Image: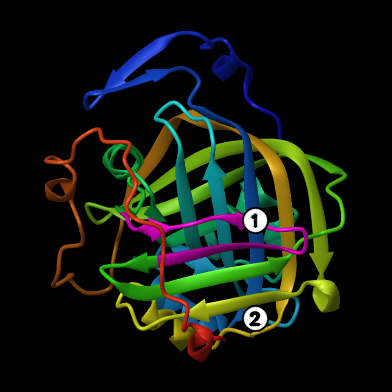
Amino acid sequence: MGVPKRIKRYEGQHALVDGIPYVMPINCVDSPALFAGFQINADKARAFLPGNELHPFRLWNGKGLLLITVINYLETSIGKYIEFSVAIACTHGRKPAPRLLPGLMMGFYGTGQYVVDLPVSSEISVKGGKGIWGMPKHQANLDYEITDDTVSSQYEKDGQFAMRIEIDRPSRAWIPFNIGATNYCQFRNMLFASYIYFKGKAGFHLFNSANARLYIGDHPRTAPLRELEIDGDAILTAFIPEANGILDDHFDTWFLTYDEAPETMPEGMESVVDLGLSEEWLASPSITDYQQFKI
């Protein structure tokens, strides 16, 4: 799926939202990205999805899919930052979709990912990502390391270990891709859907060759993920040395509905109105005794 022509016509135009200046289109350039997918208990994944309108995507065996994506944004409209996405593959509609088919008919089934957690490096990224697109961004201690053999990222917050992902680096990135993706997020107790288009060249590992190590700590933002019964063996890993992405010029929002009246209110505008435009990062992660948290 290529970038819509209307977005390309915005090139070089300017926008100003919540005090954040943007040069359109909102994009990233030549930024390395890692990706890993793990099988999970789809029935338990349903409890992580808000409202009645999202449903876990199911693989051929009825399992769900946990998606870890980390992008080291080297050049964007709001400066450099790392983004560590923890998400559950899902569909959007009145009822659950059949197995696998939503992977082929993504538009029909509203196939995408529900973002459970989204730590980032900078305050300005939190202000823009949450305040405009409803993404569950918050500032955390993050790193992104590339060696000859591995690609990894670690996530800490408030002095606590939260998560670490390591994948074996593919020998080369030669498969060209040009895809669109849908991110679903909960903000103000509404469902937000934003759309992004990526292109580049990737190296993949599948099934038995998809070697990854996932570590989940005791931080309250990540510890509940253990309830998903995550399979320690990834079914897919990928590394994109130079990803180029464009964020769509619009997003969709819906009311979330529940069988019973909600008793608590999730994060709302109060969590972003006082944020500034700082591009400064928190200190790099420093915890090294994470082996005990391996999935």
Category of crowding for the residue at label 1, using alpha-carbon neighbours closer than 10 angstroms: few (below 14), some (14–19), many (at least 20) = many
Label 2 is placed on what type of residue? Lys
Q: Which mark is residue 63?
A: 2
Residue 214 lies, in percent from the top left, at 58, 77
What number is the disc on residue 254? none
Would you say residue 150 sits in the magenta stretch? yes
Quadrant where the C terminus sits is: bottom right
Is 108 situated left or right of 113 in this image?
A: right
Classify 10 Å Cα crowding around label 2: few (below 14), some (14-19), many (20 and above): some
In the image, what residue occupies the spot 48% across and 82% down? 290
Of marks 2 and 1, the one in the foreground: 1
Residue labelled with disc 1: 34
Between 63 and 294, which is closer to the camera in this rendering? Answer: 294
31 and 25: which is toward the camera: 31
Percent x, y for residue 213? Answer: 64, 77
Q: Quadrant of the N terminus?
A: top right
Q: Is residue 8 left or right of residue 148?
A: left
Given the image, on which type of amino acid does mark 1 rest? Leu
Q: Position of residue 47 (x, y in %)?
A: 40, 78
Instruction: Report whether residue 85 is seen.
Output: yes
Q: Secondary structure at mark 2?
A: loop
Which region shows up in magenta? 139-155
In the rendered view, tell whether residue 158 sits above or below residue 290: above
Label 2 and label 1: CA atoms lie apart by 22 Å
The image quarter in which residue 37 lies = bottom right
Q: Does the stretch in magenta take in 234? A: no
Label 2 with label 1: CB-CB less than 8 Å: no
